[in-house]
Amino acid sequence: MASSDSKQTYLFKKMIKELKTKKGKGTELISLYIPAGRRISDVAQHLREEMSQASNIKSKSTRKNVQSAIEAILQRLKLLKEPLEKGVVIFAGMIPRGGPGTEKMETYVIEPPEPIKTYVYRCDSEFYLEPLESFLEDKDVYGIILVDRNEATIALVKGRNINVLKKLTSGVPGKFKAGGQSARRLERLIDLAAHEFLQRVGEKANEQFLPLLQEKKLRGILVGGPGHTKNEFVEGDYLHHELKKLVLDTYDLCYTEEFGIRELLEKAAPLLKDVELMKEREVVQRFLKELIKEDGGLACYGEKEVLEALMMGAVDTLIVSEELEKYKVKIACNNCDYLEEKTVDKIELMKLEEEIKNAQCPKCGGALSIVEEKDYIEYLSELCEQSGTKLLTVSSETEEGAMILNAFKGIAAILRYKIHQ
């Protein structure tokens, strides 16, 4: 879990989240995806053709904004160096900032994490982000089938997420006295009902998992449940023969619903050690084990305490919630050497920007200005790089990530050594 990888993934997610908020007044925001190896001169020629076409737009303001956006992209193309190994993505457009006349041209040049394969030019009222979002999709997926004679659950483990796809109930009768019919006949009826239920489970699993197999995303299938039914399911002809090859193991469980999924993941941890969900769970569990030790162990939490430990180089692993929307702000005097640093959240940052316009330097009375606004997680990641600390950013969508956000205010650490005796 390299700190740089965690940092880049976090910043990439944050950038997409920010771009989603950008809206144009009309269809005047341009999204340009240039594939790896595409000649910049060919792209520039296409943009000049689009510039000519834009002159036919009836609305004067839309025409002007589209042409300005194309011109902004053409200027950025001049700064690119060939060959484009992964390609490049450029967004440009006039973004309203408030009332009339507050629009500002915004341009973003992004190096994708993976090679761009298709050339896209799109003009719309918002930026076209789907190809970028696809890079964040978890490529490796594991199927889960929990089954007994009464019920079944079909689910997926994708990265940090557990997605329950189907829940089925059998209606298979339990044991009861024979009544007016022979016990053997009742047994046959029960076995037939159980067989039909397993067929239904297999059909639903095939529907969910075969498309993922064809897309080469499905890495394996884990089967679990109480009793012998899970073994009957795996050994019988209920799953598609290609899916049967991907069954990694079966597990004895107490449950067949969400509790069963968590129980299975615990037992299958050695097999799933490369899955993001399991990596996250392992680190957070390690932190909690240290926390409950009588002497406090090697656990540390709270912004002030963690920052102190980071500065000392005492942190082995830093755990930060992706929902920690804070900024490290530097305020400087325009006349003297006065410099002040603050950590503020998003709302406080907006207020601070307004306050600074009328504030005076406490040292010389001169005008103040904000000289740097840095995302707080990016700031923490730089401290991690300086001290060789591993960084784990956690999502609040997982149980462990939600705990870090709610119980520890979004920041915790596992120490290399105790800093307070």
Image (spheres, rainbow, N blue to C red):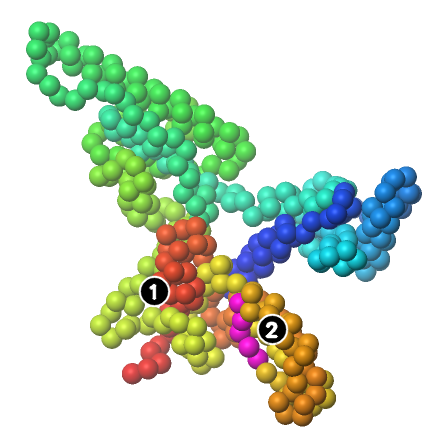
Q: What mark, if any, has residue 287 been given in the picture?
A: 1
Image-quadrant location for residue 221: top left
Instruction: Write the residue at 68% across / 55% down.
Output: 111
Q: Amino acid at mark 1?
A: Phe
Label 1 vs 2, first from the N-terminus: 1
Instruction: Write the residue at 67% across / 90% down.
Output: 365
Please tell me whether residue 343 belongs to the stretch shown in magenta: yes
Can you give x and y, in whole percent of width and height, for residue 80 in the image?
Answer: 79, 58
Q: Quadrant of the C terminus?
A: bottom left
Question: Taken as a whole, is the magenta stretch helix, strand or loop?
Answer: strand
Instruction: Write the residue at 74% across / 42% down.
Output: 124
* Residue 348 visible: yes
Work out whether 330 lies above or below 5.
below
Q: Residues within 10 Å of mark 2 (few under 14, many from 20)?
A: some
Span shown in magenta: 341-345
The mark lying in front, picked from 1 and 2, is 2
Instruction: Write the residue at 58% across / 59% down.
Output: 11
Question: What residue is disc 2 on?
Answer: 352
Is residue 148 left or right of 136 when viewed as pictured?
left
